[in-house]
Amino acid sequence: MAAPAVPAAAEPAAALVRSPSFWRSVFARLRRDPVALAAAAVILALLVLALFGPWLVPVDPYASSVLRRLKPIGTPGHPLGTDELGRDMLARLVHGARWSLFMGVTPVVLAFFLGAAIGITAGYAGGLLGTAIMRTIDVFYAFPSVLLAIALSGALGAGIENALLSLTLVFVPPIARVAESVATQLRNRDFVEAARASGAGALTIVRVHVLGNALGPIFVYATSLVSVSMILASGLSFLGLGVRPPEPEWGLMLNTLRTAIYVQPWVAALPGAMIFATSISFNLLADALRSAMDVKG
């Protein structure tokens, strides 16, 4: 998989983005979009499973039994069957939502703050400082995101903390590029020039005028990276570089169930189906949010 694509022009909505009426119109458009509502419902359901899974499905996801291994879907007491060690698949999928969402969302959140800070600094400062920052960021684009994540995780060592750090470093460059593009456009807008002429300092202008208009487009783009982050995190766990056994993470479950694909293919495909549904939901929600914030449209 190549590095996440960066929009050619992440145009801010100028002062409208900071207006409460603008955000009311955005949410009104989202409420009229059935695709956005369906995607949001799926994501909300996954969040509920991640937060309240142990109470909704009070079954031990670690309890194994050789006698009940690889039971098919629909088995009494195990509606989604069991895995290669006889552990309940429903319980493991529900508990796995916590790990998978954590590994998918956390790197993007961290990269959002780091990348936005780097990009806005480079875009507003411009000149040699901005060029030096962005040319350093461009070095990361020489590597596909998958290879970069694997290389960083392999160099740092297997483990959740190192996987989170690797994924964060993968997503900082594309977010920084979008932030730099938005800040560069805002730097010469009339309201920024007026604030500069009134004697406002650089920090005040960035905090009051640039951040308020730049964070919206950056947030929309970062939302679209959550699906990529989940796939990469699952891939790292599949390779043994992320979450370790016996934790019920969806990518790790795919790895452990790959030998059962010819025995119970439907059971083995369940973690992949969860990854697909979650990723496509985040993608659809990000696209709907981008369309709702398109003032020209």
Image: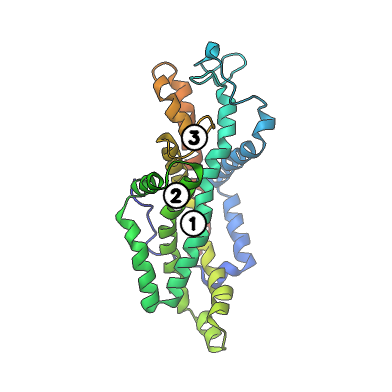
Mark 1, Cα crowd under 10 Å, few <14 / some 14-19 / many 20+, is: many
In three-dimensional space, the C-alpha distance between marks 3 and 2, rounded to whole angstroms, equals: 17 Å
Which is more toward the observer, 245 or 35?
Answer: 245
Which secondary structure, mark 3? loop
Residue 167 visible within the image: yes
For the residues bearing labels 1 and 2, Cβ distance under 8 angstroms:
yes
Residue closest to the far left: 142
The amino acid beneath tag 1 is Ala
Q: Nearer the viewer, mark 1 or mark 3?
A: 3
Residue 294 visible within the image: no
Q: Which quarter of the figure is the N terminus placed in?
A: top left
Q: Return the mark for residue 150.
A: none
Residue 255 percent coordinates (x, y): 42, 29
Residue at 43% over, 68% down: 180
Residue that numbered label 3 is attached to: 244
Residue closest to the far top: 67
Residue that numbered label 2 is attached to: 167
The amino acid beneath tag 3 is Arg
The amino acid beneath tag 2 is Leu
Residue at 59% over, 75% down: 208
Mark 3, Cα crowd under 10 Å, few <14 / some 14-19 / many 20+, is: some
Q: Return the mark for residue 111.
A: 1
Residue at 55% over, 72% down: 15
